[in-house]
């Protein structure tokens, strides 16, 4: 897909670091699959991956994490 930010390049498959914050909770996910613009560095995470990130974030909030840095892992859907 063409980058919507710089409009100069096609994105390529890569990884991103995603930070989510809600109230007092900060979560960092490393190595998240994403489309990355080689020109400006903008990162695009697809809908399925975003849903999994939000699900994992809810789990972290539920157990009382305040700051959590973790490796992204794709959850298999049964």
Image: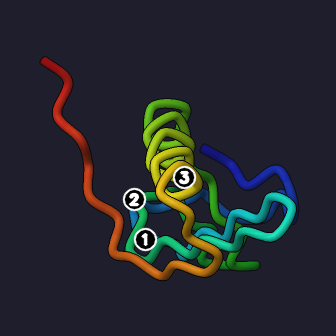
The residue singled out by tag 2 in the image is 33
The quadrant in which the C terminus is found is top left
Q: Residue at x 39, y 76 (%)?
A: 70
Q: Residue at x 60, y 43 (%)?
A: 1
- For this rendering, which residue is in front, 20 or 66? 66
Q: First in sequence: mark 3 or mark 1?
A: 1
Asked if 41 appears above or below 63 in the picture, the reply is below
Q: Quadrant of residue 42?
A: bottom right
Q: Quadrant of residue 6?
A: bottom right
The residue singled out by tag 3 in the image is 57
Where does residue 26 sit, x and y in percent of width and height?
69, 73
Give the distance between the C-alpha atoms of the residues marked 3 and 1, in whole angstroms: 18 Å
Give the distance between the C-alpha atoms of the residues marked 3 and 2, in whole angstroms: 16 Å
Asked if 3 appears above or below 42 in the picture, the reply is above
Residue mark closest to the camera, 3 vs 2: 3
Asked if 40 appears above or below 48 in the picture, the reply is below
The residue singled out by tag 1 in the image is 15
Q: Residue at x 48, y 82 (%)?
A: 69
Residues at marks 2 and 1 touching, judged by CB atoms closer than 8 Å: yes
Q: First in sequence: mark 3 or mark 2?
A: 2
> Secondary structure beneath disc 2?
strand
> Secondary structure beneath disc 3?
helix
């Amino acid at each position: 897909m063409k980058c919507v930010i710089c409009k100069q390049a096609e994105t390529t498959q890569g990884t991103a670091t995603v930070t989510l914050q809600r109230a007092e909770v900060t979560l960092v996910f490393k190595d998240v699959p994403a489309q990355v613009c080689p020109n400006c560095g903008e990162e695009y995470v697809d809908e399925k991956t975003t849903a999994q990130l939000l699900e994992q974030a809810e789990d972290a909030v539920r157990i009382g994490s305040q700051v959590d840095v973790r490796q992204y892992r794709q959850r298999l859907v049964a």
